[in-house]
Image (cartoon, rainbow, N blue to C red):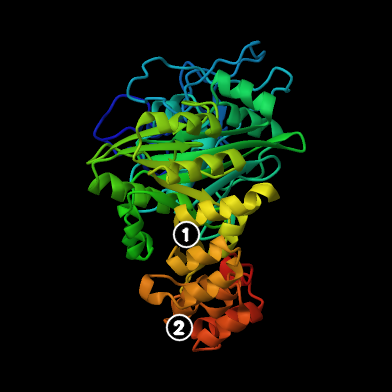
Amino acid sequence: MTESVYDVTPASDEPVAGWHPGTPGTPGVEVGGRRAARLAQAGQTAPTSYPPAPGGPVPAPAAPVYDLGDDLAAWSAPVGQPVAVPVAQPQAVPATPPAAVPPSTASYGYDPYQATERIPVAPAAASLPSVAPHAPAQVVTPTGSPEINFTRHAREVADSDLITALAQVVYQGASDLHVTADAPPTVRVDGSLRPAVPGGPWARNKVIAALKTLLSGDQAAQFDQEQELDFAYSLSPEYRFRVNFYQQRGNWGAAFRIIPTKIKTLRQLGIPEHVGEFAKLSRGLVLVTGPTGSGKSTTLAALIDLVNETRADHIVTVEDPIEFMHEHKKAIINQREVGADTHSFARALKHVLRQDPDVILIGELRDLETISVALTAAETGHLVFATLHTQSAPGTIDRVIDVFPPHQQGQIRTQLAATLEGVVCQTLVPKANGTGRIVSTEIMKTTPAIGNLIREGKTYQITSAMQAGRDAGMHTMDQDLAELVNVGTITRKAALEKVHDLEGFDRLVQRVESPSDASADAIAASGIDFGDKFSGGY
């Protein structure tokens, strides 16, 4: 059986995690594996300082003390309360932290299968006062959830409470985890935020100490200098996170976005399959756009995987950080991460054309230099995929052109009309039945008519061209939202938050109020707080 973060002892045939019945008169508790069960059992049999008096009442026993091994101080659990056994760490934080923080190997490229050295926990900065040991919250493991095969870093180096919170992202089907001072760790499930684990807010010292355990020495120095840091962290071979560290009001904060390791197909994602035609192009620029958290990277990964499976090409990606890990299939693929494999997008793209690529993936078009290289690469016979944070096809074209100074914009319009092959805009909308979110798309293909509109600066007419281009595989976001409302997949109320033209959308919608709208209104009007998104808070 695979190891669990809650069990660092040699294997046996017992379950890794389970329900511990507790002592008579005390509740059963969820424990963290074989070691936790043995420690809890040892606590039951430990003598107390109150031996029972003959014929008299039995005094309340003292709080059992659990021996967590030679490397940890004993931790006393209050009697009658659930016992959450901390994850064993290789050494306790010293009372006086050392001058240098031992680096970890949490950065991208860490191989959990090659690491053999037990790396100590990185303590908090010397300037921070010491705090009492923090008992981690209990882990909620839903029935039927897959067992997480935690990496060695997650088991032995990273803060146990932080790993518990990251595990909840997996168990609760969340997309994000937020960690910040004076608030509990919070997950985003189906677009709504809720606490990740039981317990109160994390203090500033706790947040800093926990987050530091994910950083290598170089990363810690970079974060100290730039006060921003992007990297990827592997919780297990199956679960990776895109991580952003930042500072706010002098405190540390972090956002974790889970990255599925299994790349889904366009059909599985709900993206129209004719979007896959872009993967067959020999040259040109294809842009996948949408707001933050709309699944742009996931769609791009599906397109790159389609190229990888069907074409004998050389694919080069430049990402910050690398999210989806691709394997060589029919194509060969090289993935370069900003910060680990190259210093910047601009520097990587400056040399990418010398690496004999057929297909280039640019994680994000951030500035004029990056956009210029993307246009040049597409113009010189390469297929280029990239993302932008725009919410419509006409807005995407305007955004690219407006990056350049006015005296160059005419030339860029001509270049864009010749190289742009298509734009896929997407957003996520809550389903009417409350079971998740569904993707809604806007698809534009650069037909000769649309190419002329781009060249002539008439991007405001592109929406009409897309509305009339159903036969060519095009549609607007409003058309797709209206179709989802008409079949009952989403509510009209949810769609109204995403539409661009309300009047045009209303003409497309066949039902003014769907049954799901009426149900949601009735629930909201009742004033009952269900503690979820149906309480009118979404």
Q: Is residue 135 visible?
A: yes
The percent coordinates of residue 157 (x first, y second) are: 48, 24
Residue 354 sits in quarter: top left
* Label 2 CA crowd tier, 10 Å (few <14, some 14–19, many 20+): some
Element marked by disc 2: helix
Residue 249 sits in quarter: top right
Q: Is residue 62 left or right of residue 166?
A: right
* Label 1 CA crowd tier, 10 Å (few <14, some 14–19, many 20+): many
Q: Is residue 513 visible?
A: no
Direction right: furthest residue: 249
Q: Image quadrant for the C terminus?
A: bottom right
Query: Nearer the viewer's eye, disc 1 or disc 2?
Result: 1
Image mark count? 2
The percent coordinates of residue 70 (x first, y second) are: 47, 16
Which amino acid, by three-letter code, is at mark 1?
Val
Q: CA distance from mark 1 to mark 2?
A: 25 Å
Which amino acid, by three-letter code, is at mark 2?
Asn
* Residue at x-position 43% and y-position 46%: 378
Give the residue pinned by disc 2.
486
Q: Is residue 460 above or below residue 5?
A: below
Question: Which residue occupies the foreground of this view, 121 or 69?
Answer: 121
Q: Is residue 95 left or right of residue 85?
A: right
Element marked by disc 1: strand
Q: Which mark is residue 423?
A: 1
* Residue at x-position 23% and y-position 49%: 310
The percent coordinates of residue 59 (x first, y second) are: 58, 37
Dots 1, 2 in contact, CB < 8 A: no
Q: Is residue 15 above or below residue 401?
A: above
Question: Which residue occupies the foreground of this view, 90 or 115?
Answer: 115
Q: Is residue 522 above or below residue 77?
A: below
Question: Which residue occupies the foreground of this view, 107 or 531?
Answer: 107
Q: Which mark is residue 362?
A: none
